[in-house]
Structure formats: C-alpha cells, structure tokens
Image: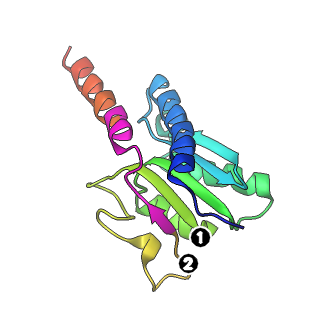
Amino acid sequence: MDTAGSPENDQFFLRKAIEEARRAAEEDEAPIGAVIVRDGRVIAAAHNQREQLRDPTAHAELIAITQAAATVGDWRLEGCTLYVTLEPCPMCAGAIVQARIPRVVYGAPDPKAGAVDSLYRLLSDARLNHRSEVTGGVMADVCGHLLTDFFAAKRRASKK
C-alpha cells in the first residue's frame, strides 16, 4: 500500500488531528490530537485524555493506535499514516515502532520531549526493528499555538 502523502493530503488529515486537539482543549486536556489513515480513510481519531482517565499513558497517539488496531484487526498497522499535532514523545514513538506504522506526520516540534527529531530520533534508529518515514513541521504554527494558548490560559487562571 502506498503510504506516501502529498502536502495537500498531509494538511487535510492534520486538520482532522487539529479538530481532535481542540476537543481535548474543550475537555481541559492538553490539546494534542491524532488520526490514523489507511487507504485514504481515517480509521482512528483520538485526543489526549490523561486528566479524564487519570492515566499517564492516555496520549492521543496511543489511543489512536489502539483504535486503529481494533479497526484493522491486527496489531501491525502496515499501510497506515499517523498524523499528530505534536512531535511524539519517547513512549509514543516506541508504540509507533511496535505497531509498525510506516509513516508519521506531525505538526509542532517538541523541544522538551520530542523523540522523533528534537531530542531523539527513535523512528529512524537503524538499531530498532522498524523505521518510519517522518514529515515534521506540517502546520506547525497552528499546532504550536494550540498548545501555547492553552497553557497561557491555564497559567492566567491559576493566578486568579
């Protein structure tokens, strides 16, 4: 299956992830969203739910990977592309490797916890049994502003 995406397709599907990130913000969760696409169709869509579920592993990517595996009926998500608004952390990058996702597109870089390009390069590490093609920085300004605006509002609210 062809997992390569055009810039237009990448933006289209990343907008779907941004919609998920906005849902997270509405639920007072860190605004991070993810969708997984296979054969041009969204097969999973999720957003952060750490606060709601009281679960440190309830990241958008992990929830989407679980949904996609259930949809596909296999833990191997070959032929899929993961779109996420923020560069995946080490936990999520590890899950991407385990799920064999061949392509990842992310919005904003994460200089404090990014494990795809910023701090580590787990998805391109030849020592691991799987590598993913990565396209980073797609709609980075929009994705980054979701996060900075959310946390600025949280800081303002805590000062009151």
Image point (43%, 56%), residue name:
88
Q: Position of residue 159 (x, y in %)?
A: 19, 19
Quadrant of the drawing holding the N terminus: bottom right
Residue with the mark numbered 1: 98
> Could you tell me if residue 40 is visible in this image?
yes
**Does residue 21 appear left or right of residue 87 in this picture?**
right
The quadrant of the rendering that contains the C terminus is top left
> Helix or strand or loop: what does disc 1 sit on?
helix
Q: Which residue is mark 2?
A: 130
- Determine whether, in the image, residue 110 is placed left or right of residue 65: left
Residue at 37% in and 36% down: 142
- Give the x, y percent position of residue 32: 45, 40
Magenta-drawn stretch contains 139 = yes
Per the image, label 2 sits on a secondary structure element best described as: loop
Determine the CA span between mark 2 and mark 1. Answer: 8 Å
Looking at the image, how many numbered discs can be counted on the residues?
2
Question: What's the image's color scheme?
Answer: rainbow
The answer to whether one can see residue 52 in this image is no
Mark 2 and mark 1 lie on one chain; the one further toward the N terminus is 1
Q: Residue at x 40, y 43 (%)?
A: 139
What residue range appears in magenta? 133-146
Question: Nearer the observer, disc 2 or disc 1?
Answer: 2
Q: Decide: marks 2, 1 in contact (CB < 8 A)?
A: yes
The front one of 143 and 55 is 143
Picture residue at 28% right of the left edge, 34% below the top: 148
Q: Residue furthest left?
A: 159
